[in-house]
Amino acid sequence: MPAAHTARPPFLAPFPDGEWLFRQKELSQNERGMVTVVAVTLAAAAALQLAAALLALRAIPHSGFYRYPWIALSLALALMVERRVEPLLDFHDGLADLGDALYALLISALIAFSLVGLDRLLRAIRGNQEQLARLATTDALTGLANRRYLLAELDKELRRAGRSGQPLSVLMIDLDHFKVVNDRYGHAVGDAVLVAVAARCLSQLRAIDLCGRIGGEEFVVLLPGADAEGAAATAERLRAALAETPIDTAAGRLNVTICIGVATDHPRSPRPDEPSEGDPQSQVQSLLQRADEALYQAKASGRNCVRRAVGDSHATARITEGADT
């Protein structure tokens, strides 16, 4: 009975039937070398397909809703590895087709090359998404939270405070006479002052606090868990950090001071006969308005000082005074 021939790709049709077909027990020295080439080629194809399967697996955690196609692709590639390994285990039976091995190597290389490109594309997309997220939530100049993100976080913190019963304080900060800095030294120096103010504020805050710039020279700080006394102490540290050390700029060392308004929300469970406090959005606006009114009192009292919102404490006098700038 004639030996069964393995199927070969069409591009190998011009070659004689026996040119690529070997039986190991009848191999000459040259033919054994050819079998080694076949084995190495199949092993390389298997390695490429295994690498492609691993690339597909690595993409799964970062693919979101599209992870299921990547799971299917990784499984398919893993099964294809078995088709490359099986001929290596069957060499003792005598059949080794170099054409099929080269064809498998070409396909495996193309698959691996394509998945490397897809992996780089996914990494670029994730990087762009992270950059867009940063742009959507941070102030471009200072790197602090922007107005939209800060208001969203304030809403979350109010909800969390309502559930836990913990206080939440807000600091409203405004630079004293900042327009004079811009008019006298230019906007580049003014921007440098804003960046320095942001950095000093961050240096005085806890990791759980959030500082944001809501426009111009106005900043807001969220202090989760801080009562009126603790918030006033934090505000004083911020004021002193700016007032006691001038800011280095291209125009020289500038004395910069700030006014701060402090407002605190003390959540509690309403009695059955009490109406609810309203929706969280109205609480956000109410808390910010109280902090803004306290800030207005600070500016009207001579600047470079801290004021608490009416109702947060019986002490409504100026906490600290400094020289105007």
Image (cartoon, rainbow, N blue to C red):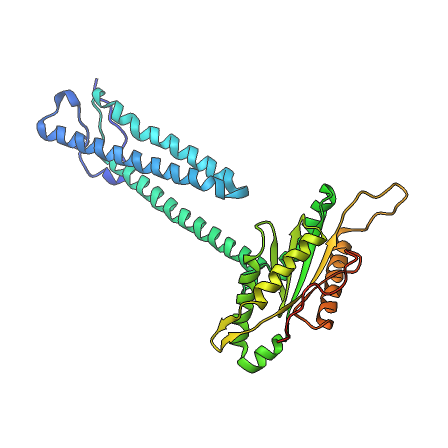
Most extreme residue toward the right is 273
The residue lying at 30 percent from left, 33 percent from top is 46
Most extreme residue toward the left is 29
Percent x, y of residue 148: 64, 59
> How many discs mark residues in the rendered view?
0
Q: Is residue 67 visible?
A: yes
Percent x, y of residue 300: 73, 72
Most extreme residue toward the bottom is 184
Left or right relative to 150: residue 52: left
Residue 54 quadrant: top left
- Image quarter (top left, top right, bottom left or bottom right) of the N terminus: top left
The residue lying at 57 percent from left, 66 percent from top is 242
**Residue 279 sits above or below residue 241 on the image:** above
Percent x, y of residue 289: 75, 62
Left or right relative to 272: residue 291: left
Q: Nearer the viewer, residue 231 or 53?
A: 231
- Image quarter (top left, top right, bottom left or bottom right) of the C terminus: bottom right
The residue lying at 31 percent from left, 38 percent from top is 48
Residue 220 quadrant: bottom right
Left or right relative to 90: residue 253: right
**Residue 193 sits above or below residue 315 on the image:** below
Percent x, y of residue 267: 76, 47
Q: Nearer the viewer, residue 22 or 293?
A: 293
Q: Nearer the viewer, residue 294 or 134?
A: 294
Q: Is residue 141 visible?
A: no
